[in-house]
């Protein structure tokens, strides 16, 4: 296991393979296990570095501030690159991790050899309402993580999959993927997830002008059943200069679980099309 310290946070990451570095950031209630089914293929061709966001998995924050906000999480990503001595790197993101990645890129995309945004958006709240309504919605959402344990929540997805698990529940691999989802989410602390939800999801503005300032090569991927992020994906692909858009037919929100081989293939093709420039330091190998 590997950790690095940033302020009052001890952030967990893994470091596998060799070649051009790819830092990967998961979504809400996920952790590095989200990338398990794509990791093998990616780490055979590049240096694959998944990290766990604040409030998730083995990453721990002690004291205040907890940094459960989009700017701090984005800065954590670049701090990991600094810790590993990476001048530039590819960034692979999913959902909430994508919120942080794309918002950071709006401010400065010079560190990114490429930016891959899967099932995500540039607003940090999918509720397009005034601040009070956003807060009430996420307070109610956070309460579910206090009231129910992980087995209860995953079991309920069989009946009411919601927008995040629709693709999984409608797939032929439903039982296998739900068992794996329980293994994955159980590595998170539910009260901490509730605090993260109340703090992180605040801004319904997609920051279109910021999207237009992103200069690194960008790939946007979404599943046609990912009801919350179809339009936001199309918006990002339309507004980020030169961005490429890929839609997965019959796929939902969890692309790295639902179609890992397809996602890994498309990521590797995009990386091959946008390599680090000759002479740029990829950071070599690091031990875990």
Image (cartoon, rainbow, N blue to C red):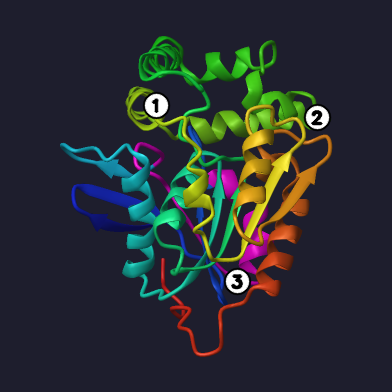
Q: Residues within 10 Å of mark 3 (few under 14, many from 20)?
A: some
First in sequence: mark 2 vs mark 1: 2
Q: Secondary structure at mark 1?
A: helix
Which residue is at the front of the view, 238 or 15?
238
Q: CA distance from mark 2 to mark 1?
A: 28 Å
First in sequence: mark 2 vs mark 3: 3
Image coordinates for residue 163, horizontal then vertical, percent? 65, 23
Image coordinates for residue 168, horizontal then vertical, percent? 72, 29
Q: Quadrant of residue 146?
A: top left
Disc 2 and disc 3 in contact, CB within 8 angstroms: no
Count of numbered badges drawn on the protein = 3
Q: To which residue does mark 1 refer?
A: 197
| Location of residue 186 with respect to 52 vertically, above or below | above
Q: To which residue does mark 2 refer?
A: 171
Q: Which residues are magenta?
A: 33-57
Q: CA distance from mark 3 to mark 1?
A: 33 Å
Q: To which residue does mark 3 refer?
A: 46
Q: Secondary structure at mark 2?
A: loop
Question: Residue, x 37% and y 23% (percent of image)?
Answer: 194
Left or right of 89, for residue 74: left
């Amino acid at each position: 296991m590997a950790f690095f310290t940033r302020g009052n946070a001890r952030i967990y990451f893994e470091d596998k393979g060799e070649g051009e570095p790819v830092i990967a950031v998961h979504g809400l209630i996920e952790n590095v296990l989200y990338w398990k089914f794509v990791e093998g293929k990616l780490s055979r061709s590049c240096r694959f570095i998944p990290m766990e966001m604040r409030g998730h998995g083995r990453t721990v924050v002690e004291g205040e501030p907890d940094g459960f906000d989009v700017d701090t999480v984005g800065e954590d990503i670049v701090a990991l690159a600094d810790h590993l001595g990476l001048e530039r790197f590819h960034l692979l993101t999913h959902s909430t991790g994508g919120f942080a990645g794309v918002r950071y890129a709006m401010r400065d995309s010079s560190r990114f050899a490429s930016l891959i945004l899967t099932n995500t958006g540039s607003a940090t709240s999918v509720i397009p309402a005034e601040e009070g309504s956003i807060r009430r919605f996420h307070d109610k959402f956070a309460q579910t993580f206090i009231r129910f344990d992980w087995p209860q929540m995953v079991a309920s997805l069989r009946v009411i999959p919601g927008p995040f698990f629709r693709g999984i529940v409608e797939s032929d691999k439903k039982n296998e993927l739900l068992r794996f989802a329980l293994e994955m989410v159980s590595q998170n602390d539910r009260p901490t997830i509730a605090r993260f939800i109340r703090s992180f999801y605040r801004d319904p503005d997609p920051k279109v002008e910021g999207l237009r300032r992103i200069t690194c090569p960008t790939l946007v991927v979404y599943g046609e059943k990912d009801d919350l992020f179809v339009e936001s994906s199309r918006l990002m692909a339309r507004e980020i200069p030169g961005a490429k858009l890929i839609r997965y037919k019959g796929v939902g929100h969890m692309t790295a679980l639902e179609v890992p081989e397809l996602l890994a293939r498309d990521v590797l093709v995009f990386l091959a099309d946008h390599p680090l420039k000759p002479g740029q330091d990829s950071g070599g190998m690091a031990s875990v």
